[in-house]
Amino acid sequence: MRLLWPLCWVEHMSLDNETGLDPPGIRIRPVSGLVAADYFAAGYFVWAVLIANLANIGYEEKNMYMAAYDWRLSFQNTEVRDQTLSRMKSNIELMVSTSGEKVVVIPHSMGTLYFLHFMKWAEAPAPIGGGGGSDWCAKHIKVVMNIGGPLLGLPKIVAGLFSAEAKDIAVARTVAPGVDIFGFQTLQHAMRMTRTWDSTMSLIPKGGDTIWGTLDWAPDASHDCVAMKAKKNDTQVAGQNGKGGFDGSKSVNYGRIISFGKDVAELHSSKIHRVDFRGVVKGHNFANTTCRDVWNEYHDMGIGGVKAVVDYKVFSVDSVLDLLEYVAPRMMKRGSAHYSYGIAENLDDEKYEHYRYWSNPLESKLPDAPEMEILCMYGVGLATERAYIYKFSPPIADCYIPFQIDTSADGGSEQSCLRSGVYSVDGDETVPTLSAGFMCAKGWRGKTRYNPWGIKTYVREYDHAPPATLLEGRGTQSGAHVDIMGNFALIEDVMRVAAGATGKDLGGDQVYSSIFKWSDRINLQL
């Protein structure tokens, strides 16, 4: 019976594959209050350390609110099902009216995208929005302190949606292919579940090839993995001009987010013969009826459809969107109703008033709140997934995923950014620096079409240093995506702002990476 428990968990965590809401007969809801995210598990803090420090300067539950939401749902559906956006708006209004002070908002990870959506929702007229009016944010929000925000998406989510993998899973799959708690179908069950979570599609990279690079160019191509690996447990002196970081001479084709074969990843695009998969008729169903328990859309592609994907050979972010629509049409049909991944041509076009654009900072404007501030706060100095080398995985069972990260693909030396089929770049192990920092470094910097009212933005980077001793636990100088919530320097910055400081009072920008240099290389209309 115990072997069925994981399958029971998958069944209950999955959403309806058509509606993106509760499946019949199952209701899972988020916990409310500060306990919703203080610890992930016993001894593994998330918000707990920050909450405790804020309590030391006088904050308590009446003036500190945890905006928990169901992170599986699309952002707009959290309002449709749970009225989460309405509750957040009411709580903020209550805090402002009782304290007389505007709120400090501290989103983390996907929460940064969720709060972008919320600000647009709060101002939009009912029934699509909260009806607060164009000055709601100006009246209620002092500062938004985005921590580890994947504002422009995650390459990592592409691998997750495409093959239910990331670096660590791919390596484990190679080392111990027979270890499987679901009876040799772990990844299939994971794919079935995660492809019902519409929230994951909010993390698909935004801005296309303009932001993430083409087949032969990427803004962060000069990243030097050697410099990053050689770092010691010392504190670097942060640069204010964005000239610190890890720039080397050898370029990596980071714009090729998926390549079938290491040789394809390294060739100039003019030497790659590709056969377009778009419009190719998919083959006959090669899966038998037993696959219905772990159904994913690969079972309906057939060999012809799989071969068409492999023959295309290399994908940039632009073509990855077409790829996901080809291999997972039902998932992407739901997702396209809630999210968009492009760059707006004219932000005054009425179509951008629809909620599908609200969480994309390249297709929406910041609110009319010139006194508000936005801080992009994130870790750097850790190898972070940026692009992948794949291989065709021949069927070893009736139910299988036909594509797999090629863990045999290595760069051949310590100087390479390629390890176990994954190209890495600077970031916090989850979010690349480009995604976390670009909007504050350039997209929103000064008065731009994305920030027409000139909200002040600051880049605050925290250079990773591993714990010096076991007594430090997960480290007090960590730049890792979750562990940064215990970073003393970040906590100090949050506490100072919560006590009344501004971004300028913190010292303005604090930069260790090449975010400003990489941002300058992106040709984006501002």
Image: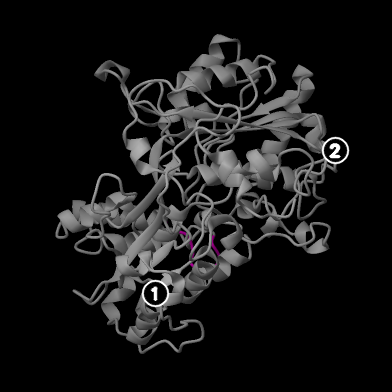
Using the image as rendered, state which of residue 123 and residue 371 is in the foreground: 371
Locate residue 94, reporting x and y percent. 74, 27
What stretch of residues is rendered in magenta? 14-20
Using the image as rendered, state which of residue 497 and residue 343 is in the foreground: 343
In the rendered image, the quadrant that contains the N terminus is bottom left
Tell me, yes or no, whether the highlighted magenta stretch contains residue 114: no
The disc label shown at residue 313, or none: 1
The disc label shown at residue 399, or none: none
Q: Is 319 above or below relative to 281?
A: above
* Position of residue 1 in the picture relative to residue 209 (left or right): left
What residue is disc 2 on?
A: 135
Q: How is the image coloured?
A: one colour
Question: From where the camera sits, is residue 60 visible?
Answer: no
Using the image as rendered, state which of residue 22 and residue 69 is in the foreground: 69
User: Marks 2 and 1, how far apart in space?
Assistant: 49 Å
Q: Identify the secondary structure beneath mark 1.
A: loop
